[in-house]
Amino acid sequence: MPFSHRTFCRVPELPSLSEVLVCLRQSGHQAQILGGASQARSSADDLLSCYWGEVHLVLGGAAEETLLYLKCLGPSRPLGHDAMRDAVTDFVDDVAELPASAGRERVLEHLASTRAVLVVEFPSKGSGPTAEQAAECITTLCAERADGLAQRDGVGFVDEDDDVILALA
């Protein structure tokens, strides 16, 4: 499985691709959409829809630069409810194995009420700080706009201030 960041959202309407691009631009990241899929009927709808499915983002403005792969999982999305349920179940299983703590309970409660999941996958060849910062920008946007809880591979679950709630090894 590729190195990823995720946001487990309680609100099914995630930010539109247009909002994602604006957020990245405001954070100093040059990004463009390389391709992907959505349920919307036209390209204009794709950018404005809260129900997009997957997209490839190029950071730095050229195909040679870092590529991030964004996927939205959940009902009313191309990748569907089953994919969301599988992602949530995998994390519930992992978190349930950890010792009891307030962080563990908070994460399990949040996962139980998840209605959409945003996944940001990094390229298999690795990525640099620009991709990491852009991914954090996207996951934070989703956490803020869709009552989400961010999870970062290699770190764990983090709150809105980027403080670790529950570490995952």
Image (cartoon, rainbow, N blue to C red):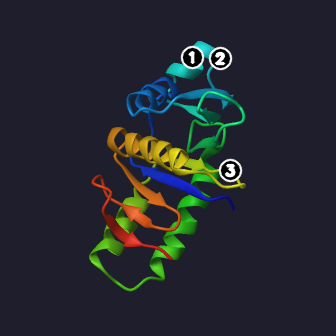
Query: From the viewer's perspective, is 165 left or right of 115?
Result: left
**Is residue 13 shown above or below 18?**
below
Give the residue at mark 1. Answer: 45
Q: Are marks 1 and 2 in contact (CB under 8 Å)?
A: yes
Residue 116 shows in this picture: no
Q: Are marks 3 and 2 in contact (CB under 8 Å)?
A: no
Query: From the viewer's perspective, is 92 left or right of 41?
Result: left
* Residue drawn at point x = 47 percent, y = 31 percent: 20
**Is residue 59 shown above or below 156?**
above
Residue closest to the eye, 90 or 32: 32
Amino acid residing under circle 1: Asp
User: Looking at the picture, how far across and down is residue 38, in whole percent?
Assistant: 64, 29
Q: Quadrant of residue 66?
A: top right
Q: Secondary structure at mark 2?
A: loop
Looking at the image, is mark 3 or mark 1 earlier in the sequence?
Answer: 1
Give the residue at mark 3. Answer: 123
* Residue drawn at point x = 58 percent, y = 52 percent: 84
